[in-house]
Amino acid sequence: MQVVLIGVGQAGGKLAQAIAEFDYEMDLGAVTGALAVNTARADLQSLTIETQLIGQDRVKGHGVGGDNELGAEVMDADADQVMDALEGRITSQADAIVLVGGLGGGTGSGGMPVLARELKAVYDRPVYALGILPGRDEGSLYQVNAGRSLKTVLREADSTIMIDNDAWRSSDESLQAGFDTINQRVARRIGLLLATGERIGEGTAETVVDASDLINTLRRGELAAVGYATCEASEDAAENINAITSLARNAVLTGTSLPDAVDAQSALLVIAGEPQRIARKGVERARKWIEEETGSLDVRGGDFPMESDRLAAIVVLGGIERSRRVEEFLDRAREASEQTSASPADPTESFQDDRLDDLF
């Protein structure tokens, strides 16, 4: 699958760059272009992908200070600048456009849904969002922002893949070190997922997985998650049957971007590795297990040839609205909204944009 990445805001720009770098270093060829968009000039200066500064008339390159209503207004006013920067990058080869952004900040949470709306009005291909949920310790404003942004992104994007910061950051890591770790882990998962169907190395897939399989999996639900697990592989495919089943279990139960997201409307299983090491019986058993575990009868499966002495399982779960993790986040957002509303200096009182209406 070939995509154009657009990182919106500080977190979005860094993660978009991490995914683009992983794609380049692995020679996957899935990312055909990458652009970072921000209202803060300083956040763009450290990036090596193409950048676009917006909101200069309103915020003079200093960012929106966590105000996602202002982030939405700036993106709405300067969307033509972003569209101009994308001209020539979104070609007929691109199967989809992927927006990447933090749901808790200002530019990303406010600007991402606005840009999704603009892109869908112009381009006739899926527009996906890769949304990062704030951690529990990132402050009440971030929780409120994320709750409101999530609802709007779900409405404007074709599907939203969730990344939960709390899922991977170790308790003894600093906030910045934690984010760096998350970016690298997400980049590997998303990078391999996007490369599914692209020809890597000399091997030939026995059961081909292509862009349409991913598109159809994500089409079935608003929220999605990506699971990943890897292990060493035997040279004898027959000895890898149980390993492949275990990989699928680990990817779903302990390796997803949104923990506890098990119930799903659809799923896609991809086993990556050298074709001679991939046991078809193992792939089929793993696919059957995912059907039973998720309750979905719409589970696609196949293999992704790569030169490696390891096997990896990539699992996409589509339609995970019933996730307990999402409910826990919404409870935090509701509580934060109530606490913030009690303050006389409520930064969300002017949140009246009907495209970013109150989640509650």
Image (cartoon, helix red, strand yellow):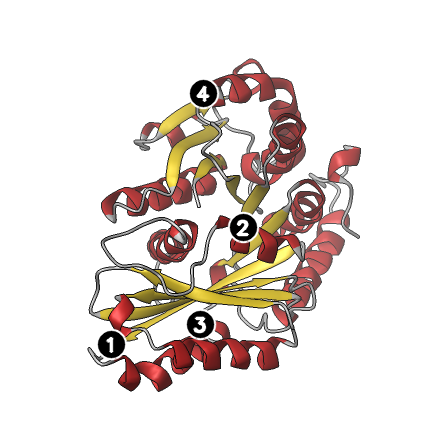
The amino acid at mark 2 is Ser
Q: Is residue 352 visible?
A: no
Q: Which residue is mark 3?
A: 251
The amino acid at mark 1 is Ala
Label 4: how many residues lie within 10 Å, few (<14), some (14-19) or many (20+)? few
Q: Which residue is mark 1?
A: 233
Q: Is residue 15 visible?
A: yes
As helix, strand or loop, the secondary structure at mark 3 comes to: helix
Q: Is residue 177 above or below residue 48?
A: below
Query: Circles 2 and 3: CB distance less than 8 Å?
Result: no
Name the residue: 28% across, 51% down.
Answer: 200
Query: Circles 1 and 2: CB distance less than 8 Å?
Result: no
Q: Quadrant of residue 134?
A: bottom right
Horizontal and vertical percent position of residue 116: 62, 35
Q: Which residue is mark 2?
A: 212
Left or right of 198? Residue 289 is right
Q: Which residue is mark 4?
A: 88
User: Which of the marked residues, 1 or 4, is nearer the chain's N terminus?
Assistant: 4
Horizontal and vertical percent position of residue 7: 46, 37
Query: Circles 4 and 2: CB distance less than 8 Å?
Result: no
Horizontal and vertical percent position of residue 184: 33, 54
The amino acid at mark 3 is Ala
Q: Quadrant of residue 224?
A: bottom right
User: Which of the marked residues, 4 or 2, is nearer the chain's N terminus?
Assistant: 4
